[in-house]
Image: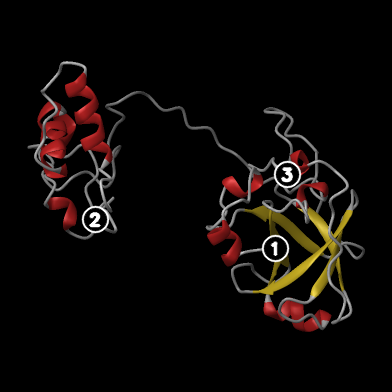
Amino acid sequence: MRKAVEPPGEARADWQILAALAERMGYSGMGWADAAAVFAEMAALTPCFSAMSHARLERPGGLQWPCDAAHPEGSPILHVQSFPRGRAQLLPVSQVEPDECPDAEYPFCFTTHRLHFHYGGGAMTRKSPLLERETPAGLLFIHPQDAAQLGLHEAQGVRVRSRRGVLETRAHLTDDVPPGTVGMPYHFREAPCNRLTNSAQDPISHMPELKACAVALEPLPADQAPRIELERPPEDCHAGP
């Protein structure tokens, strides 16, 4: 990835730090001039990258290996006629419905997800002021069509109930989810959405079905803030595939 800004002050790029550490340990062979030189050395030593260049990466689309004399433009599809690297075993599969599907009592599909600001780290710390500034509280992602039918407005409190638990959060109207499906990020201790999810297991892998269940929604009065859930330890909201 290209750097966004020049390193401030005395800060250095990772490859410069590695080179300095190597030199202090008595090895001077990592004294590259720039990142392009690092890439050139890697390509020279790796046959499947041999036709790649740092400058070529600037062109849209990037390069996919093997990119060598036989494939100077790279290989967008690796296995076409055969499997030259390893062998594949293809098994037919059939669609299996989630263990719990929407019904009259719980009419919405429910899933959990990450937010790009907190991503995985928010489930553990949430002590970054800048990230908290962007997304300071839990959310329920809901399609505007569903929100209109419920009389639910942006940032309004909403109660989410499944067969396993209930919590309150605030609505976020977005077409990131389709009608009939709602989702919650699992970063927020005050809205631990994994209390709602299903522990039913896959019969072969025994992984729990944490990403799919059915819920019911109840808008809170416009002037009523969501109830904060803090009576359980934060470990409740760490999990989430």
Mark 1 or mark 3: name the one nearer the start of the chain.
1
Q: Which residue is mark 3?
A: 210
* In the rendered image, the vertical position of residue 58 relative to residue 206, given as above or below: below
Q: Are marks 3 and 2 in contact (CB under 8 Å)?
A: no
Q: Quadrant of residue 34?
A: top left
Which residue is located at x 62 percent, y 74 percent? 174
Which label sits in the foreground, 1 or 3?
A: 1
Instruction: Give the residue type at disc 3.
Output: Leu
- The percent coordinates of residue 64 (x first, y second) are 24, 44
What sort of colour scheme is used for the picture?
secondary structure
- The percent coordinates of residue 108 (x first, y second) are 79, 64
Instruction: Give the residue type at disc 1.
Output: Ala
**SS class, disc 1:** loop
Q: Which residue is mark 1?
A: 137
Query: Distance between the Cα atoms at labels 1 and 3?
Result: 21 Å
Q: Quadrant of residue 106?
A: bottom right
Which residue is located at x 92 percent, y 63 percent? 105
Which label sits in the foreground, 3 or 2?
A: 2
Mark 3 or mark 2: name the one nearer the start of the chain.
2
